[in-house]
Image: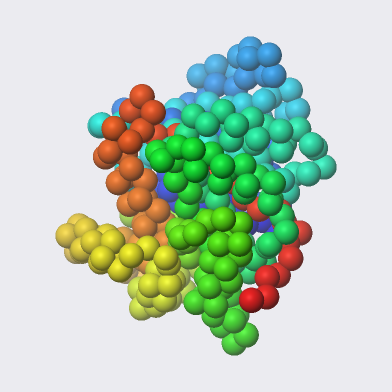
Amino acid sequence: MSAGKSTLINALIGTELLHSANEATTATITRIHDVDHIKQFIANTYDYQGNIVHQKELATAESLKQWNQDKNIKSIDLMGNIRGLTNTQSDLVIYDTPGPNNSQDDNHEELTMELVNDGNYGMILYILNATQLGINDDLHLLHRIKQAINTDHKKEIIFVLNKIDEIDETYESIEGIVNNAIHYLQQQGFENPTIIPCSAKAGLIARKLIYQDKLTRSERHALHYYFSYFLSNKDNFTYSTLKAEKIAHIDTLIRQQRSNITISVDDKHYRIADLATVAFHSGVGILAYLIQDKLNQPKALYNNILRILTHVTQKNLVLFQA
């Protein structure tokens, strides 16, 4: 089962760009460059010798899916506006890396390790599936990442517990899953891990609607549920490991951006202010704030560039019991 990495990146971007499905789809390294003046994403693709295969082509979810499946393509560069983030002080590049859930091809893990060993990045988003929390996967990579962070104070890692909206709270709780993750990560040497419970799908739908992108039929059906759930349910972010004062600060920023403009979907009306709150409670808004906060500190970056690696755990996971 997919942990929703592509959906999370789409939610951060604010539009449906990367192909997402209930399977492990990432086979190349995709670099997403935030270029504010470009309205639509354009792409260059490269083979394993560094030669350009496609140049300045319009990027769509379908074309990215095809390029991702092309074994001759090693990497993809996307250039376009990442909505909701401003990079006037620093440049932003998000890396979508192949996960070990593509283990049928050992080259996928080598590509990820190549980036980790390169060290030219400032933040890692490490995505865990909250419904299948794993413990024995990726230990080698976790140890490598821990070593890299220990030797460079500019680097930080954020663990994203995605799909919290799919938890059956009859048998388990968000708080319990977060505590399990804390316990496991502390065993791997992460003394005070930053953990953000998240629903990338809810955040994506809310942000697409804010930016007036067209929703699919399934997204329209899911909208009302997510709107009701995340507008009233704050458990997901109160159980994050962020300090209370930082959460309060982010919440204040969201409230300052309140708008009474409404958007209608299937005869229901949604205020943009409430949609922003839903995106915040989903965890996506919190991640966007943390990224923006990092962008606003150019001295803490490499050559004023924030490079973010995204990584996801294996799909065959072992349930952790505290």
Relative vertical location of residue 37 with respect to residue 235 in this rendering, above or below: above
Q: Is residue 24 left or right of residue 270?
A: right
In depth, the one of 311 and 140 nearer the eye is 140
Q: Residue placed farthest to the bottom in the image?
A: 170
- Please tell me how many numbered marks the rendered image carries: 0
Is 102 displayed left or right of 92 in the figure? right
Q: Answer yes or no: is residue 82 visible.
A: yes
Q: Which residue is at 55% across, 51% downward?
A: 126
Residue 322 higher or lower than 158, as above or below = below
Q: How far across and down, in percent of the image, does residue 69 sit?
A: 72, 34
Colour convention: rainbow
x, y percent for residue 153 = 41, 40
Frontmost residue, 206 versus 300: 300
User: Viewer-proximal residue, 148 or 30?
Assistant: 148
Q: Is residue 243 above or below residue 208?
A: below
The image shows residue 192 at horizontal and vertical percentages of 46, 60
* In-image side of 313 versus 202 (left or right): right
On the rendered structure, is 55 left or right of 2?
A: left
| Residue at x 25% of width, y 32% of height | 88
Residue 10 in sight? no
Residue 318, percent from left and from top: 74, 65
Residue 61 falls in which quadrant of the image?
A: top right
Quarter of the rendering occupied by the C terminus: bottom right
Q: Residue furthest right?
A: 104
Q: Is 201 drawn above or below residue 143 in the view shown?
A: below
Residue appearing at x 52%, y 31% in the figure: 119
> Which of the image's four quarters has the N terminus?
bottom right
Q: Nearer the viewer, residue 59 or 289?
A: 289
* Residue under the image location 36 percent in, 78 percent down: 232
